[in-house]
Image (spheres, grey):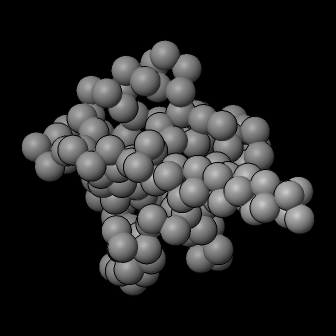
Amino acid sequence: FFWMVNFGYYINFFALGMLGAYESRIREEGISWQEVVDRNENGETLLVIDGMVCDVTRWLPEHPGGNTIIPEQALNQDATVYFELYHASKESFLYLKQLYIGQMKVEDLNKIYNPKPDVLPSQEFLEQLRDFMRPETLKSYKSF
């Protein structure tokens, strides 16, 4: 009986710890463009997808497309078009919830480099992405 009580305690402890990952991972105050660039230059891999900042550093070795395509194509720029282009399956959205660390600061949105300003993500993709990434749905996901 004692073992079962302690086991239940540890399960609750770890489960609550996983739920707490949201608070320790998400930056409610927003993330500046300069921080994204600085962190990328210092060895992390942060992507900006439709104004959302995702930290893919720890996940990069698991990326099905390999660990070099993201750093070669999508760092320090708006990666929204690339994400739509390479991720036809909406299952990829599940990873975004785990990798999401916050929104870009509103005042920095115009600083995001767009290498192909004439190529835009489709409206349908943006609507699906924004619906899936609603803030109230993010708290149930732990970080990768």
Residue 70 rendering spot, x and y as whole percentages: 60, 41
Q: Which of 119 and 69 is in front in this view?
A: 69
In the image, residue 56 above or below residue 85: above
Q: Which residue is drawn at 66% across and 60% down?
A: 12
The outermost residue toward the front is 1
Q: Which residue is drawn at 88% across and 56% down?
A: 3
Q: Residue at x 66, y 37 (%)?
A: 58
The outermost residue toward the top is 42
State left or right for residue 92 relative to residue 101.
Answer: right
Q: For the image shown, how many numbered marks are present on the structure?
A: 0
Residue 132 rendering spot, x and y as whole percentages: 45, 77
State left or right for residue 100 relative to residue 123.
Answer: right
Camera sees residue 41: yes
Camera sees residue 116: no
Q: Quadrant of residue 29?
A: top left
Q: In which quarter of the image is residue 34?
A: top left
Q: Residue at x 64, y 52 (%)?
A: 13
Q: Nearer the viewer, residue 114 or 97?
A: 97
Quadrant occupied by the N terminus: bottom right
Residue 7 rendering spot, x and y as whole percentages: 81, 57
In the image, residue 143 above or below residue 128: above
State left or right for residue 24 relative to residue 105.
Answer: right
Q: Quadrant of residue 110?
A: top left
